[in-house]
Image (spheres, rainbow, N blue to C red):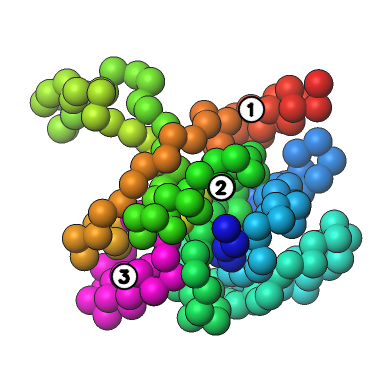
Amino acid sequence: MQYEVVLPAAGSGKRMGAGQNKLFLYLLGKPILAHTLEVFERDDRCTGIWLAVKPEERAFIERMLVEYGITKVKGLPDGGAERQHSVHSCLKAMEQVSIVLVHDAARPFITHDIIAHLVESAHDYGAAIAGVRAKDTMKKVSNGIIEETVDRESLWMVQTPQAFRFELIVEAEDVAEKVGFLGTDEAMLMERLGHEVRIVESSYENVKITTQEDLVFGEAILHKRAL
Ligand code: CTP
Ligand code: MG
C-alpha cells in the first residue's frame, strides 16, 4: 500500500546545543537528515516526500538531495514557529493522497517493517502511531513529590511515524489551527476530535536525536546494523 510522507525538518535543535540545525550533524559520515531521507527513498511504497524547511536552509537542503540521490521530494514548503505549523504547511501543499505519514526528520532509524504496519493500520482504522512500552517504573510527580505510581502496563512512549488517512489528519490540523490548539504530536489532534488512534509496537532503536548522548547511541545503532 502506497503513502506519502511529511518530514518536519525546520527545527533549531536547541537541546542539542550545536549552534545549528541538528539535522545537519553527521552520524558515521552522513547528515542525520540524509539518513532519514534514504529510508523513504528506498521504500518502494513511498511515492512522495514533503519536507518542511527553514527558508534560509532550503538551498543547502536542495544540494543535499542531489548529493545523496534523493529523488522523491515533491515539495519543500516553509516550516513554522512550532513543529505542528511545519507539518500543517506540508499538508496544505500536498495533493490528496490515500495515506500520509508524519515522521520527525530527527528519527533516522525507522525501518520499512514498522512503516508497513503503520500504513496498513491507518488504512484499516484511520489513524495509527508508532510507540514502545514504558520500560521504567512510572511516577506522577508534583512539586518534587510523588503523587502516585502509574500502572506501567497501560503506558506507552509514542514516537513517529504517525500514519493517517489523508482527509482525517487534514481535518484535525485545520480544526487545531482554527481554535489555536497546539499538540505535541498529530495523534493528539485526532484524539481531540474523538477519532480512534491505534498504537503499532515499534522499536527502541527508533530514537529521536535530541541531545548529545543520542549521537553516541545513534552511531552505535548504525555500527550494529552494519555487522
Ligand atoms: N521541527 C520543525 N519545525 C519546528 C520545530 C521542529 O519542522 N518549528 C522538526 C525538527 O526539525 C525535527 C522534528 O520537528 O525533525 C522534531 O522536533 P525536535 O526533535 O524538537 O527538533 P528541534 O525542535 O529542532 O529541537 P529542539 O526542540 O531541541 O530545539
Ligand atoms: Mg523542538
CB atoms of marks 1 and 3 within 8 Å: no
Please tell me the numbered disc located at residue 105: none
Amino acid type, residue under disc 3 in the picture = Ala
The answer to whether residue 37 is seen in the rendering is no
Q: Over which residues does the magenta segment extend?
A: 164-187
* Magenta stretch, main secondary structure class: helix
Judge whether residue 175 is colored magenta.
Answer: yes
Q: Which amino acid does label 1 sit on?
A: Phe
Q: Quadrant of residue 220?
A: top right
Task: Report if the beta carbon of the residue with label 3 is closer than 8 angstroms to ligand 1.
Answer: no
Identified at 25% across, 23% down, the residue is 152
Give the secondary structure at mark 3: helix
On screen, residue 109 versus residue 207, left or right, reads right
Kind of residue indicated by mark 2: Ala
Q: In this view, does 109 lie to the left or right of 61?
A: left
As displayed, is residue 163 above or below residue 114?
below
Name the residue at 44% across, 34% down.
201
Give the CA separation, mark 3 to mark 2. Answer: 23 Å
Question: Closer to the observer: label 2 or label 1?
Answer: 2
Instruction: Examine the rendering and report whether any part of residue 52 can be seen.
Output: yes
